Amino acid sequence: MLTYNNYKISSAELELLEAVREEAKQARSMPKIDVFKACELVQLDMELLTPELLSIFVRSLPQAFGRSTHFFPTGTLELSRDEKWLISLVSAISRADYDSVHFLIKTGIKPIHQKPCQSIALHLWKITA
């Protein structure tokens, strides 16, 4: 277990965090993706690889949150609010803790985007498999 500003994360979560940070860095130079379009992409292509799935999800988050997202550069020893949220979400999905998944979606995502965002998020189990 590693500790980032009093938030403990496992080595698997650290690996995910670094992958998310790398995707977020790449996403800065790419267009944002509409949440509903992202949901369609994920539903249509069940064979999406982890980096593609992460890219789609990260690029749709600003619209889902209704604000800009903040991800630190790889190797940074602190966590942003968005990074904590995403790690908590993927961790809850990997534990099949759907009450926590629902809570995180409900408290973090704009109401209009909650259903498609939850649909995309549930595909994130592939990351932890």
Image: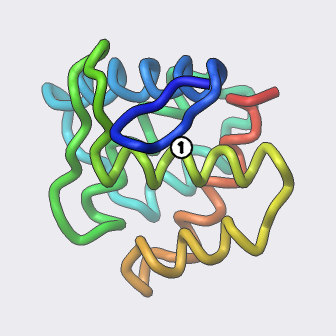
* Residue 35 pos. (x, y %): 41, 61
Secondary-structure class at tag 1:
helix
Q: Which residue is mark 1?
A: 87
**Point 55% across, 56% down: residue:** 39
* Residue 29 pos. (x, y %): 14, 26
**Point 76% across, 74% down: residue:** 99
Report the amino acid beneath label 1: Ile
Rendered position, 104 above or below 82:
below
Rendered position, 107 above or below 63:
below
In the image, 119: left or right of 5?
A: right
In the image, 83: left or right of 24?
A: right
Q: Residue furthest bottom?
A: 111
Please tell me how many numbered marks the rendered image carries.
1
Rendered position, 97 above or below 48:
below
In the image, 115: left or right of 76?
A: right
**Point 31% across, 54% down: residue:** 81
In which quadrant will I find the C terminus? top right
